[in-house]
Image (cartoon, grey):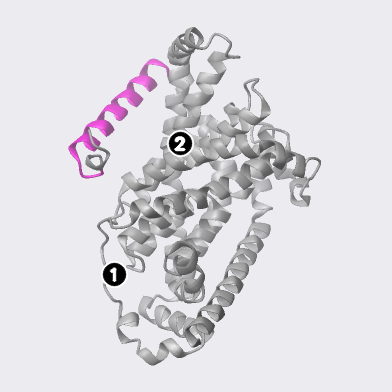
Amino acid sequence: MRIGMFHARSREYTVTLAMLTAILVLSILFFPERAFQSSLGGLTIWWTIVFPSMLPFLMLSEMMSGFGAVRGLGTMLEPLMRFMFRLPGHGGWAIAIGAVTGMPAGAEAAGKLRRENLVSREEGERLLALSHVASPFFILTVIGAGFLHNVATGVVIAIVHYVSAIGTVLLLRFFWRGTDSATLAPTPLLANRKAKDARKPIIVRALSDMHHARLEDGRSFGKLLGDSVSGAIQSLMMIGGTMIVFSVMLGVMDTVGIARLLSEAVAMAVPNMPSPVESIKSGLSGLLEVHVGTYLLGQPRLPASVTAALIGAALAWSGLAVHLQVQTAIRHTDLRYRYFLLSRIVHAGLSFVLTLLLWRPLTGWFHGSLPSFLSDPASRSPHNGLTSWSVWTVVPHRLIELAVLLAIAIGLSLIVSVFLRLGKAK
């Protein structure tokens, strides 16, 4: 079966969902106690990490879109985004949200931009790949300080994760070139823009675009606030449900002994492999669910470089649970899942290789370094006392990080704009 055939409207997709549902129901019937414990574990991770870390930013994304701020930021970021990634400036918001909040917030933002016709299909697919990254909070605080008890390792994983994400998009830029891409239908704002507007200062154009976008939206503050809350809660409920389902599947697979059977086969092929059962269990977890998977990948007694490379690959792959969440985020668009799947495979492979290659120089550089924000209570493992309150306490810091990231991007975009104008003047 070709990947392109597997989509939300295909017969194969329906059969697959029916099979997964039947397996889940039978698992709950035959192993009710393990299913309950596993679902409780998935619910705990969702409530203590995912819900508080994503809710404010999903609400902020909807409100900024309604107020026209996303359109204004897109105008400001247009020179930088076109110069670096051949993407419209509106994509800068999706990248910033994805980088600060983590997956699948970038997919939510990219899908929204495509639904509002602010990016073409090809641009939306490249933006989906670029904005789909893990948050620095999760990598540094939860994985580095919590799971691995080593902040320097978390820093290395984070650097390689973001560098390989950019490298993935740059590599796939040639693959996307010439693909079937839907053209943008002009919005009233774009249709009414006159040629002389292009000669205005970029800040003036950004303010004008923001004002027109707010008028086009037309929702009052109360209506916009209600929509942002309901939309964010609905997205988070979908994410939580997916996490719980895959947690139950992982628990039942462990109870049935699938990991043990696979470990015996691997042990025959690789006799010197340490802890084959734990390694196989961790690998299956990483394939299915990223939060549980990264926690288990840090447990087997493997060399530190290999452990970091496996965790980096699991973060880049992001788990089938997140893949389903991304498919839900883009369900009302024409963005194609097969390109997202290809980007995850390339990102995982690139992250694994780069971690092994850069392990020695990066660990030597960051050895003994401890960022100050890791001294807060959230630096504890979610399996050893991380509470939703401790995550809520770092939300203001993450809002500041988002503002700083956007400010740096706008500053770079203004510099690129000046150089482009100087080049045209010559």
Residue 145 visible at all:
no
Task: Please tell me which residue is depicted at 55% across the width and 20% down the height of the picture.
Answer: 279
Please say if the residues under marks 2 and 1 sit with CB atoms less than 8 Å apart: no
Viewer-side residue, 324 vs 315: 315
Mark 2, mark 1: which one is toward the viewer? 1
Mark 2 residue type: Gly
Q: Tell me the quarter of the image containing the N terminus.
A: top left
Q: Residue furthest front?
A: 426
In the picture of the structure, the residue carrying the numbered disc 2 is 319
Viewer-side residue, 43 vs 178: 178
Task: Please tell me which residue is depicted at 51% across the width and 52% down the height of the picture.
Answer: 166
> Residue 373 location, x and y as percent?
75, 51
> Residue 63 location, x and y as percent?
48, 68
**Span of residues in magenta:** 7-31
Residue 294 visible at all:
yes
Q: Is residue 207 above or below residue 54?
A: below
> Residue 187 location, x and y as percent?
30, 77
Residue 208 position by quadrant: bottom left
In the picture of the structure, the residue carrying the numbered disc 1 is 184
Mark 1 residue type: Leu
Magenta segment main secondary structure = helix
* Mark with earlier residue (2, 1): 1
Residue 5 position by quadrant: top left
For the residues labelled 2 and 1, the Cα–Cα distance comes to 32 Å
